[in-house]
Amino acid sequence: QVQLVESGGGLVQPGGSLSLSCAASGRIFRINDMGWYRQAPGKQRELVASITRGGHTNYADSAKGRFTISRDNSKNTVTLQMNSLKPEDTAVYYCNADINISWASSVSAWGQGTQVTVSS
């Protein structure tokens, strides 16, 4: 019914930057909150940043001052700009969106994940 497709992961040196993008498609009535999570090997998935439909943002302490989340409601996309990357940012990053597929029905959709590796 709904698909989230991520792009933009890869290998970057410490101190470098990457931009992750996520596009939603399918049966979409309205997209509510969108966010980015990450999961490092042996660790639980954690919230990195989220953004409401109105543009209110929330960041994990580890992301504050380095990462910026934004969205384009007309294109059903969300972007995570990551600067000053550290080796501890290495993880699989997942896009998440709370999507109304009708007035009364919503789903929490996840992307397939994109690998971000920060290493020299």
Image (cartoon, rainbow, N blue to C red):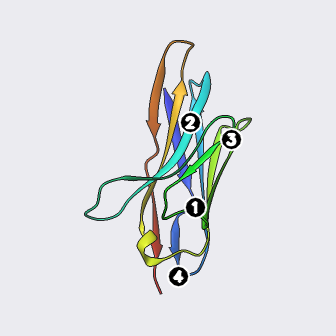
Disc number placed over residue 55 in the picture, else none:
3
* SS label for mark 2: strand
Residue 18, picture quadrant: bottom right
Identify residue for label 1: 8
- Which of marks 3 and 1 precedes in the sequence? 1
The reply to whether dot 4 and dot 2 touch (C-beta < 8 Å) is: no
Instruction: Name the residue: 49% across, 56% down.
Output: 60
State if disc 4 and disc 3 touch (CB < 8 Å).
no
Residue 101 position within the rendered picture, expressed as x and y whole percent measured from the top left: 54, 20
* Three-letter code, disc 2: Asp
How far apart are the two marked residues, 4 and 2, measured between alpha carbons? 30 Å
Cβ atoms at labels 1 and 2 below 8 Å apart: no
Using the numbered discs, state the Cα–Cα distance from disc 3 to disc 4 in whole angstroms: 29 Å
Q: Which residue is mark 4?
A: 14
Q: Residue furthest front?
A: 61
Q: Whole-percent x and y of residue 7?
A: 56, 56
Which of the marked residues, 3 or 2, is nearer the chain's N terminus? 2
Dot 1, crowdedness within 10 Å: few (<14), some or many (≥20)?
Answer: some
The residue positioned 59% from the left and 25% from the top of the image is 28
Q: Amino acid at mark 3?
A: Gly
Image spot of residue 45 (x, y percent)? 35, 53
Mark 4 belongs to which amino acid?
A: Pro
Q: Residue lying furthest right in this view?
A: 74
Residue 115 against residue 35 in the figure, above or below: below
Which mark is nearer the camera, 3 or 4? 3
53 above or below 27? below
Which quadrant of the view contains residue 15? bottom right
Spatial CA span between label 3 and label 2? 9 Å
> For mark 2, what is the residue?
33
Task: Pick out the residue farthest to the bottom.
Answer: 120
